[in-house]
Structure formats: structure tokens, C-alpha cells
């Protein structure tokens, strides 16, 4: 088995029903497991952005991204290694309040992990933490001694470190092409 | 005054007429009845061909599209009809054939409820279409049809599905049709990059042993003249893929035969001897390359294609040139220097001589009583002046007719290449004849493939379609049998077939025909078939031990060529 790197794929698309399915089957055909997925609006009005992480190799990623771009409603697709992007995830933890209160180290824990308490009631407390996977995982492991009733981590969101906005350029080119018609 | 409102069904038919649709291949049913009702009123403007199975509608539309260059249109109902079109969609996707397939769908209020004859058409067709879209309101119809034609026919062509909910067919809408000319997220004809052209020209001008691989992209782009000009200007031999056959006339001195598993010896051997491969509108299918790790490793590779996802997908290239084959070749030609590669071209002769003695002569002039498929194909080709359209099914009949047929002009072969769909041929031949009524259509099939879509004889009967059916009948699934003979120690597992008298089956449909059991009768039988007005079935009894050679076994190196069951090149 060859070494696999975690890649972040970003896909910019029109807002069309069924696009997620079209994109995900391209991963499936290449036997790539989607580690995380997040979909949102982008900075460009009407353009949606998918952020998908997967373990693979560079050659496969090149082919994958071109096959994603082949879908009619996809504007552009890219892939990045972690050093090319600024990325973040958010995690939520639901912990029994009484166990937290019994422990003297709760303040230290929250401060150390730069976490926030979102809600407290007599039964449970909800803690939020943003960070990379290893960071949110570290807090999960520490909180486990109080019993974590629920835990959820969002998909990765990412912004490129590049100084060129390739999607905006693509849209400008397309606008020019349309004006020529 | 308010604009006139018409039903969504009428909007659909008017939109198809606005796109110059002359023929629809289809089959009615519950969820598409409003459309067929409108079709009745427009029957003087648009012809409907009622097939006998929805799969046949898709293959007929493919045959029509492949010979005419137009987009094939199919209309069927929901549920089982929609699942029956999947084979045709997959085939059209693999072979880049422009199709628009319209499926009926249950009313939008019933969607997702497992209603009668409901199936998730968009969900199951997305992987095998260029675009698949569900229309839930009549207002969307004109827009979606315009977009469908633009997507199906432009760039690398492919199939599009429009799934129309029944209430979108009956709902009223204003109608104004504007063809689609632009989709923001899709640029079908990317601008040619000067740097790519320069890099390609430089490699061509430096090459001593260049070799062109021409695929269907040449035909789709109507770049046959440019292909010939490039080959002649720089003195470059040309091999064609199965789907690229007829992009160059068979008798052109630079044409060196078909590529791949059953291609010519020269084209495969020289692939691994050339110093430059120029691949034009082809995608390095594994049936062309064999083992990619031992494919043209010594050569630089230029890959010209309109689909950027094909670059470096199967074979790594040194220079990729993105664009329509014709536009690319037109840009490239002025930068290519005239050259002569006499020694290189002469080196092909040794391979050709071995193939002639060891493969071609035994196939077309056998010294045995039983007939071969190749000799029948060559005789039919010659009897039509080498100018008829060849439609094939899949298997030995396909490979041997493709090998021994000769072509004078483009768009003269219709065959299922990428998907290898048995049963493709009969409906595709119907579509080919409708698309090219002035040309003779000769359909070569086997006894297995014919029976996969044999019900389309009914369509031939109903519309009086003049298709010449040459049944190469060995009472076996011949290609599987060949592999069993070569690689499975002659264990003929489930390949013998007990067949009906096919001439009687044809006769039941009012189709003339005859059975040919000896070589002495063959020429006269072919003459009778071609002289007959209307469809004709020639049931030719073939030697079941016949095999397709040369053969590069699956996964082997392109130069690892079997000349027959016992000898290698």
C-alpha cells in the first residue's frame, strides 16, 4: 500500500439539485473515502463551494479533480495539501454538568484548549472548540473522563493561501466569452 | 394581449421541432401520454419510430446520431422504460454519442412516494449521462430542452436525460424558444493555446518515426481532411481506433490499419517502435493499449483531445493540446514542416507481409469447406463498392467485419466500442438507415447478439426499413468461445446455442432472407440481398472454430501478438 496524503478538494459549482451526488460518485468510482464534507455559499453570489477531504496520492487527485470539473454544473475544482490552505473545523461536546462541577480543573481545561461554553443547565453543558482535528480530538479525550454524552465535529472548511482567485478569473473569462456571443 | 399558453407537452414538441428534430425513437406509456397525444397533432412535422423495447430506442437513436452527426432523440415513459434505457445511455456516454432521452415521470406531488412506475431516474442516470435533469414545471421545459441540445451536441458529445413530471407535461406555459448558446459552468470549445500548438509542432518537426493514432474525435470534429493533410505533409503513418475507422479511407497509402487487441500487426508493433505518438481524439482505451506500463515507453506522446479529463488518465503524455480536433489541426498545420519518412514507412511492410500471409489470407481465402466471418465481410464490402455503412453487433462479428470491411468516406461505421453492448446492432442499424437513407446499411451480427434485440425486426417491418442483415451464424457465443479455446482449455461453458431458423423468424416479420451453407452460394446470395428492395436477412453458416486474429491478449503488451492459436509474431 502506497503512502496516502490527506488532500482537501474544493469544488465551486452552480446551485443545482443533485450535484452532491454527482460529485460523490466520482469519489466512489475511484474507491476514495470522503473523510469530511462541507457545503456552503461562497464569496461569489450564486456560487456554491464544496470542501471535501480524502486520503489519496497526487496522481489520483489530478484525475479526480478533472473528472469533477467535467460535470456540467461544476465551475472549477482544485485540490490542496494542508500547507497550501488555512483550514478549520469546529467541534461540539455535551458533558454532564454535575461531573464538570465536581472537578476543580474545568476552568483550566477551557482556557488551555481555548474552548467556549455555549450552554449550561443542571443536566448538561455544551462546549465548543474550533481547531484542527488533532486539537478537537485532544479536548475530546480530556473530556472523556467526565463522560461525553454527545460529540460532533464539522467537516473541514478551508481558504487558500494563494494570492490568485482562480474561480473569479474563470468567471471573468466566461463573462468575456458570453459578451462575444 | 396575454401571450398564448400551451401545455408543457406541446412546449416540448415545439422545442424539439425548433431544434430541427426530424425523428423521435420512442415507446409510449402512462407517465408520458400527454406528450404522445401532442405528437399525434404534430405527426406531419416530426416522425416517431415505435421501437419494440426502450433499449432499442436508445440504440436506434445512437445509430442515427453516429451516421448523421445530429443529436438522436428518444421519448419513453417512466419506471421500467427509464430503467430499460440505461444500457443505451452508458453506451452513448462511453462512445461520445449525442442523445437526448426524455422520460416521463410521475406527477410532482407523488415524487419520492414509490408511486406506480416511479423510479429515481436522475439518481440512476447521473453516472452514465453528461447531464440529467428533472423538470417539475412546464415553465422549465423550453429552457431545459435548449440546454439539453447544447450539452449533448457540443464539446465532447454525450447523452442527456430530461425527466419530465406528468404535471409539467399538462401544466400550461407561455412558449418562446431560444436555443442555448452559453452555459457559465461549461466551455465546450476551449480556446486553443498557442504554446501547446508550438510544443506539439516542435515534437512533430523533430520526429524521425512519428505515428498518428486517430480516434472518433476526428470524425466528431469533421477533421478528416486536416488529418489527411497532416499525415501527407509530414509523411506520418496513421492507425485508427475502432470508433475512428473511416476517418481515413482504407486505401490511403498512409493508413496502417486498426489499433488494439485485434488491430493490425503493424499498428501495434510500430506503436512500440515510433519516436512520437500523435493521438488525436482518442482516449487510450485498454483495448488499444494493452498493458500501459509497456505501451510506447520509448516514444514522446502528443495527446490532442477536447476533454481535458482524458489527458494523463490512462497514458502519460509529453504535450497535451486541448481543443476540438479540427481547430487544433488547423492551428498546427502551418507550423508543421513538410517531411519525408521513407525508411520508417517502408519498415511497416514487413509486419504487413506477415499479417497478409499468416492472418488475412487464411481468413479471406481459407482452404477448407467451412466459411469464415472475415471472408463474408470482405465480400459484402466489395459488393457494395466499399461504400456502404457498416453496423456491427459485438464480438467476433464486430472485430472481423471491422477488420475486413473497407471504407471510402467518414461516418461509415456504427459499433459499440467502449461498452461492448451485445444487441446494439439491430436497432442501431435501423437508426443508421433512417439517418442516411441514401446509403446501403449492412449490419453484421452473430446469433447471440441478434437475439438480444431481435424484437426490433418488428420495427423494420412496420417502417419498411431497408437494412441488410448479415448473420454470421456459428451457433456459439463466438468471442467467449474463442477465449475458452485459448485461455480456458476448450471448456465451452455455456457458449453453444440451440437456435431457431432465423430465416423463418424473419419471414414471420415479412423480411426476405436466405440461408447460405456453402461458399459456392455466397456471392450470388450477397448479390440477391443487395438487389432486393427492402430488408434482407442473410443467415451465413460459419465455422465455429473460427477465431479473430491477430490478437493481443487482455493485459499483455501491444507487441505480444498471437497470429493464430499456436504461433506468435
Image: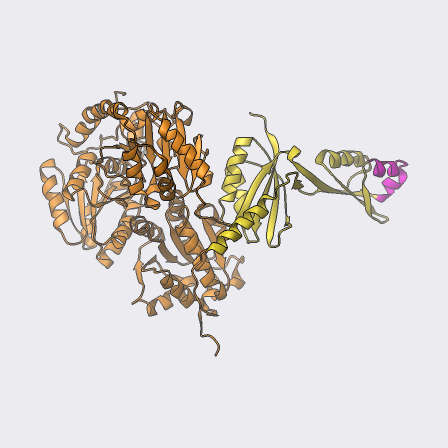
Q: Is residue B121 above or below residue B363?
A: below
Where residue B174 appears, x then y in whole percent? 47, 70
Number of numbered discs overlaid on the protein picture: 0
Quarter of the rendering containing residue B353: top left
Colour of chain B in the rendered structure image: orange
- Magenta-colored stretch includes residue A106: yes
Where residue B124 appears, x then y in whole percent? 47, 49
In terms of depth relative to the viewer, which is nearer, B235 or B306? B235
Quarter of the rendering containing residue B361: top left
- Magenta-colored stretch includes residue A59: no
Identity of the residue drawn at 29% across and 41% down: B247
Identity of the residue drawn at 81% across and 34% down: A145
In terms of depth relative to the viewer, which is nearer, A131 or A146? A131
Pick the quarter of the image with the C terminus of chain B.
Answer: top left
Colour of chain A in the rendered structure image: yellow
Q: Is residue A7 above or below residue B82?
A: above
Residue A28 seen by the camera: no
Query: From the viewer's perspective, is B525 left or right of A102?
Result: left
What segment carries the magenta color? A97-112
Main SS, magenta residues? helix
Query: From the viewer's perspective, is B546 left or right of B187?
Result: left
Quarter of the rendering containing residue B364: top left
Residue B527 seen by the camera: yes
Amino acid at each position: 500500500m502506497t503512502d496516502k496524503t490527506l488532500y482537501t478538494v474544493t469544488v465551486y459549482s452552480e446551485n443545482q439539485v443533485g450535484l452532491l451526488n454527482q460529485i460523490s460518485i466520482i469519489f466512489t468510482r475511484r474507491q476514495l473515502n470522503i473523510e469530511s464534507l462541507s457545503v456552503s455559499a461562497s464569496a461569489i453570489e450564486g456560487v456554491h463551494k464544496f470542501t471535501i477531504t480524502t486520503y489519496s496520492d497526487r496522481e489520483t487527485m489530478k484525475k479526480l479533480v478533472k473528472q469533477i470539473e467535467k460535470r456540467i454544473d461544476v465551475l472549477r475544482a482544485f485540490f490542496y495539501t494542508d500547507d497550501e490552505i488555512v483550514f478549520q473545523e469546529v467541534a461540539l461536546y455535551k458533558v454532564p454538568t454535575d461531573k464538570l462541577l465536581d472537578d476543580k480543573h474545568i476552568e483550566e481545561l477551557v482556557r488551555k484548549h481555548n474552548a467556549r461554553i455555549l450552554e449550561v443547565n443542571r443536566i448538561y453543558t455544551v462546549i465548543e472548540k474550533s481547531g484542527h482535528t488533532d486539537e478537537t480530538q485532544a479536548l475530546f479525550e480530556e473530556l472523556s473522563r467526565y463522560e461525553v454524552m454527545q460529540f460532533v465535529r464539522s467537516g473541514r472548511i478551508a481558504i487558500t493561501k494563494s494570492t490568485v482567485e482562480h474561480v473569479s478569473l474563470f468567471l471573468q473569462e466566461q463573462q468575456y466569452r458570453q459578451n462575444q456571443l | 394581449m396575454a401571450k398564448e399558453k400551451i401545455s408543457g407537452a406541446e412546449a416540448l414538441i415545439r422545442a424539439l421541432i425548433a431544434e430541427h428534430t426530424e425523428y423521435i425513437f420512442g415507446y409510449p406509456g402512462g407517465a408520458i401520454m400527454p406528450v404522445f397525444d401532442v405528437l399525434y397533432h404534430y405527426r406531419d412535422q416530426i416522425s416517431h419510430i415505435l421501437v419494440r423495447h426502450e433499449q432499442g430506442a436508445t440504440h436506434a437513436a445512437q445509430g442515427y446520431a453516429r451516421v448523421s452527426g445530429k443529436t438522436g432523440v428518444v421519448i419513453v415513459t417512466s419506471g421500467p422504460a427509464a430503467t430499460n434505457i440505461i444500457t443505451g445511455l452508458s453506451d452513448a456516454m462511453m462512445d461520445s454519442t449525442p442523445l437526448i432521452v426524455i422520460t416521463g415521470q410521475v406527477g410532482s406531488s407523488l415524487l419520492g412516494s414509490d408511486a406506480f412506475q416511479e423510479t429515481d431516474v436522475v439518481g440512476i442516470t447521473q453516472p452514465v449521462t453528461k447531464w440529467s435533469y428533472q423538470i417539475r414545471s412546464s415553465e422549465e421545459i423550453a429552457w431545459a430542452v435548449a440546454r439539453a441540445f447544447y450539452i449533448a451536441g457540443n464539446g465532447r458529445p454525450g447523452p442527456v436525460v430530461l425527466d419530465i413530471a406528468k404535471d409539467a407535461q399538462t401544466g400550461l406555459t407561455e412558449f418562446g424558444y431560444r436555443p442555448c448558446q452559453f452555459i457559465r459552468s461549461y466551455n465546450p470549445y476551449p480556446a486553443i493555446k498557442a504554446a501547446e500548438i508550438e510544443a506539439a509542432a516542435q515534437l512533430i518537426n523533430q520526429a524521425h518515426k512519428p505515428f498518428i493514432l486517430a480516434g472518433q474525435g476526428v470524425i466528431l470534429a469533421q477533421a478528416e481532411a486536416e488529418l489527411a493533410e497532416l499525415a501527407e505533409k509530414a509523411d506520418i503513418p496513421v492507425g485508427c481506433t475502432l470508433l475512428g475507422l473511416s476517418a481515413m479511407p482504407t486505401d490511403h497509402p498512409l493508413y496502417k490499419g486498426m489499433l488494439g487487441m485485434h488491430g493490425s500487426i503493424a499498428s501495434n508493433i510500430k506503436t512500440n517502435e515510433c519516436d512520437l505518438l500523435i493521438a488525436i481524439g482518442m482516449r487510450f482505451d485498454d483495448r488499444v493499449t494493452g498493458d500501459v506500463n509497456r505501451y510506447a515507453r520509448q516514444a514522446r506522446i502528443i495527446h490532442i483531445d477536447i476533454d481535458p479529463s482524458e489527458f494523463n488518465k490512462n497514458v502519460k503524455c509529453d504535450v497535451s493540446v486541448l481543443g476540438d480536433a479540427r481547430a487544433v489541426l488547423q492551428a498546427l498545420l502551418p507550423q508543421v514542416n513538410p517531411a519525408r519518412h521513407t525508411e520508417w514507412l517502408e519498415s511497416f511492410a514487413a509486419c504487413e507481409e506477415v499479417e497478409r500471409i499468416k492472418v488475412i489470407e487464411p481468413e479471406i481465402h481459407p482452404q477448407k469447406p467451412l466459411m469464415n466471418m472475415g471472408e463474408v465481410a470482405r465480400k459484402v464490402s466489395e459488393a457494395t463498392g466499399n461504400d456502404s455503412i457498416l453496423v456491427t453487433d459485438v464480438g467476433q462479428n464486430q472485430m472481423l467485419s471491422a477488420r475486413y470491411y473497407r471504407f471510402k468516406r467518414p461516418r461509415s461505421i456504427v459499433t459499440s466500442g467502449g461498452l461492448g453492448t451485445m444487441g446494439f446492432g439491430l436497432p442501431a442499424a435501423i437508426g443508421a438507415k433512417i439517418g442516411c437513407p441514401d446509403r446501403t446499411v449492412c449490419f453484421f451480427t452473430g446469433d447471440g447478439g441478434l437475439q438480444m434485440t431481435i424484437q426490433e425486426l418488428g420495427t423494420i417491418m412496420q417502417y419498411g426499413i431497408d437494412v441488410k442483415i448479415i448473420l454470421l451464424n456459428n451457433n456459439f457465443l463466438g468471442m467467449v468461445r474463442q477465449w475458452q479455446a485459448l485461455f480456458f482449455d476448450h471448456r465451452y461453458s455455456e457458449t453453444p446455442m440451440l437456435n431457431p431458423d432465423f430465416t423463418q423468424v424473419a419471414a414471420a416479420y415479412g423480411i426476405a432472407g436466405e440461408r447460405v451453407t456453402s461458399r459456392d452460394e455466397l456471392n450470388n446470395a450477397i448479390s440477391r440481398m443487395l438487389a432486393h428492395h427492402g430488408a434482407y436477412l442473410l443467415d451465413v453458416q460459419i465455422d465455429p472454430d473460427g477465431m479473430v486474429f491477430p490478437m493481443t491478449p487482455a493485459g499483455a503488451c501491444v507487441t505480444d501478438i498471437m497470429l493464430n492459436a499456436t504461433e506468435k509474431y
